[in-house]
Amino acid sequence: MSLFYDLILRIQEMERQGKKIVKLNIGETNLPTPVQAVEAAVRSLQTIKSDYVSPFGLPELRETLAAREKCSFDNIVVGCGGRETIIGLILALTKEGDKVGFPAPFWPAFPIIAKELGRIPVPIHTDYEKGWLFDEIDFSKINFLIICNPLNPSSIVYPEELIRKTLDSAEKAGVPVLIDGAYHGLAYEKVPNYEKAIRVKSFSKEFNMEGWRLGYAVAPDPVVEKVAKYNQLTLTCVPDFIQRAGIACIENEETILNEMKSIWKERQDVACSLFEEAGFRFVKPQSGMYIFATHEKITDGTKFCMDLLDQGIAVAPGESFGNYDRYFRMAVNADRRTIQEVAEKISAYISGL
């Protein structure tokens, strides 16, 4: 377990003791699931038998996703959320002892998943001064590459030229590349679908469906078949009603995602403005839903986060995302007024150090 997940347990215990915490430490959207999705799920529950569904996914959803991704029906496999789908892909494409690389800062689950599966995590360090962009990757040192784009925790979007150059190099080296696009639909500018990469997307962030557990992968046919076998051995299948909700989301995605992006951008703009005035440093977010920041007065990011927690504010220490112990990540997953109040309190706290 990492500090990131230990902190979640600590906050839960504090809440059980009756303490009020503004939880901006984890990527829960705290927004309602789109009504179209809920209505579709209810219709399914009322009319569909409780039969098993294909481990590849509901054909109707696969067809809808294939149209979204501009790929073949056979290149789509549905999973129980993005994390579970990533696990299936790592098992399908690597073997025990293989090295799994990913740019840092990174989603804390990446190294944990790699270790639990008997793979070796290889973080690829990047710097704030370079806008969190990675340099040319040495593919002789890794067997598999994961790129989170847009990036959790900094909410940057990697330049298209950088991704395409990396994919070309990976192809020459024979190294598979997985693009984790959990925040793809929350980017403020259009992000390409990179056909040379295996792509994983989730309904959790784009459509506020964290607890529903729905995701999918776009991959070559043989890889799809391996992930489907993994599904069959583990979760059996994603329930019909959840997949029907997913279809409704994709059918209404333009309306839903435009609204979501507007919400995230407004909240980030409020916090960023106050943080800039207080002297915090961060790369301006290019997608929802985080701010990854530091300040010249922060010498120990974990202590900084724990001090804020004592004041009822939970943010995630940068140490959880790699070797960034002077940073913290704040999810702007509260209403605008709360975000403004929290940003003001954090700014006031830093000014008193």
Image (cartoon, helix red, strand yellow):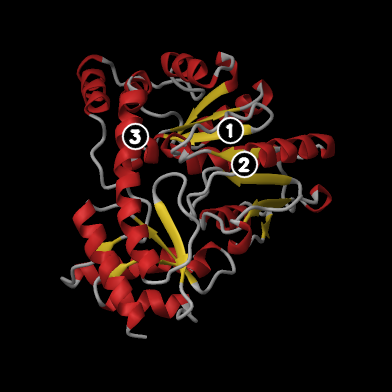
Q: Which residue is mark 2?
A: 159
Q: Secondary structure at mark 2?
A: loop
**What amino acid type is highlighted by mark number 1?**
Arg
Residue drawn 22% across the image and 18% down it? 43
Q: Residue furthest bottom?
A: 353
Q: Classify mark 1: residues with Cα within 10 Å, few (<14), some (14-19) or many (20+).
A: many
Q: Which residue is mark 3?
A: 207
Identify the residue shown where x is 43% and y is 38%.
Answer: 188
Q: Amino acid at mark 3?
A: Phe
Q: Is residue 13 visible?
A: no
Picture residue at 51% right of the left edge, 58% below the top: 108
Location of residue 244 by image quarter? top left
Assign a secondary structure to mark 3: loop
| Quarter of image, res 19 | bottom left
Name the quadrant of the C terminus.
Answer: bottom left
Residue at which label 1 appears:
199
Q: Position of residue 217 (x, y in %)?
A: 55, 30
Residue at mark 3 to residue at mark 1: CA–CA distance = 18 Å
Disc 2 from disc 1: Cα separation: 17 Å
